Amino acid sequence: MAEVEKNNTGSSDEIDLKELFQAIGNFFKSIFINIMLFFVSIRNATLKNIKLIIICGVLGGLAGIALNYVSQDYYKSSMVLKSSYLSGRLMESAIDKLDALSDEDNYQQLANTLKIDLELARKIRSFSYEPFVSEDEVVQLEVFKEQLRAQIDDEETIEKFIDKLRSENRSTYRIMVEVFDNSIIEKLEQPLLNYFQKNPYVSKRLEIERTNLLLEEKNTKEELAKLDSLKQLIFKNFNYMASRTKGGSNNVILSDEQMTNPIDVFNASRRQYEDLLRINRSLYIQDSFELVDGFTTYAKPESPGLLKWGFFSGLVGLGVAYIIIILIAFNRYLTKVEQENRAA
């Protein structure tokens, strides 16, 4: 009896597995059939309404060609700006203000904001920006990511944290501008730089930084002047001691405790001079706010050409045709349901 029950249990499990695999197969088969029926219905609708589709496609293409002649060409260029004080949120807010003014055609306010002529402002189409990732930033983020992996096991949390750092702690940005006249692109470079530089948040910090550098430069020059005087005194002292040396020897003994070590003086002078070079470099380059790459004037417009307008408008026309077909089919279905209800 036990063997019979065991055989019955095994056959029951085998039947259940067959039914399970059969159900899974039927499920995928039904999905495949429904997909094929969907394509068949699209084909039938296309063949049935081929005239409507052709007419809408041709009309869409003609509309695109007409728009190409009516619409005004626009040109696009970009510049790369680096600033330690322009965070991602601040840059986004500054660009959004300019883009909003150009979108609403408020050219007078745009001209006042950028300190440019009104006619120049009328030729601006839009503003945009994107973070510009330098090689150093990529290396630093990768090193920091590896350090986080040594401390945290959750890879998703690490990626979210790194993405937040990428978006919030940017210092270099690519600023894009679209204009209707490519001859004004280079004229916008300096006004845009002044716009970002005169930002109250940025300008205060730049002013403080420059003031500190000038004070540091003045102090370094004074220290260098004192060290130069000390070096002259050391030379005079050595010459005097050499002249007093007896025995015809020109050797100078530096064992006197009150004697200053000349090597320390020359090393201090060299360090002060290196500091002065660093300060002069910072004052000249101004690393905290720097134009990395300016605008370039391109002859080819960024706006779509005749073929693009015609092609994409033709696709829009086809989309409109299929929407009309769907609406007609839906209306027929509603009419059928209404007739069945009345008959019932």
Image (cartoon, helix red, strand yellow):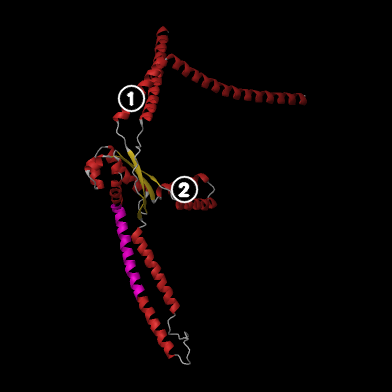
Confirm whether the magenta stretch covers residue 212.
Answer: yes
Furthest residue in direction top, as rendered: 343
Q: Earlier in the sequence, mark 1 or mark 2?
A: 1
Quadrant in which the N terminus is drawn: top right
Q: On screen, 143 above or below 46?
A: below
Mark 1 Cα-neighbour bin, 10 Å: few <14, some 14–19, many ≥20? some
Identity, as a three-letter code, of the amino acid under mark 1: Ala
Identity, as a three-letter code, of the amino acid under mark 2: Ile
Quadrant in which the C terminus is drawn: top left
Question: Residue beneath label 2, please?
Answer: 162
Tell which of 138 and 152 is nearer to you. 138
In the rendering, at what x and y percent does residue 200 appear?
Answer: 28, 53
Q: Residue at x 50, y 53 (%)?
A: 143
Confirm whether the magenta stretch covers residue 150.
Answer: no
Span shown in magenta: 197-225
Marks 1 and 2, how far apart at CA: 47 Å
Q: On screen, 209 above or below 2?
A: below
Q: Nearer the viewer, mark 1 or mark 2?
A: 1
Question: Taking 216 as reference, is 344 left or right?
Answer: right
Q: How many marks?
A: 2
Residue 74 figure quarter: top left
Tell which of 87 and 317 is nearer to you. 317
Residue 327 makes an appearance in the image: no
Question: Residue beneath label 1, please?
Answer: 63
Question: Taking 263 as reference, is 284 left or right?
Answer: left
Q: Main secondary structure of the magenta part?
A: helix
In the rendering, at what x and y percent does residue 34 appear?
Answer: 52, 20
**Residue 163 badge:** none
Q: Residue at x 33, y 24 (%)?
A: 63
Question: Taking 135 as reference, is 63 left or right?
Answer: left
Q: Residue at x 46, y 51 (%)?
A: 135
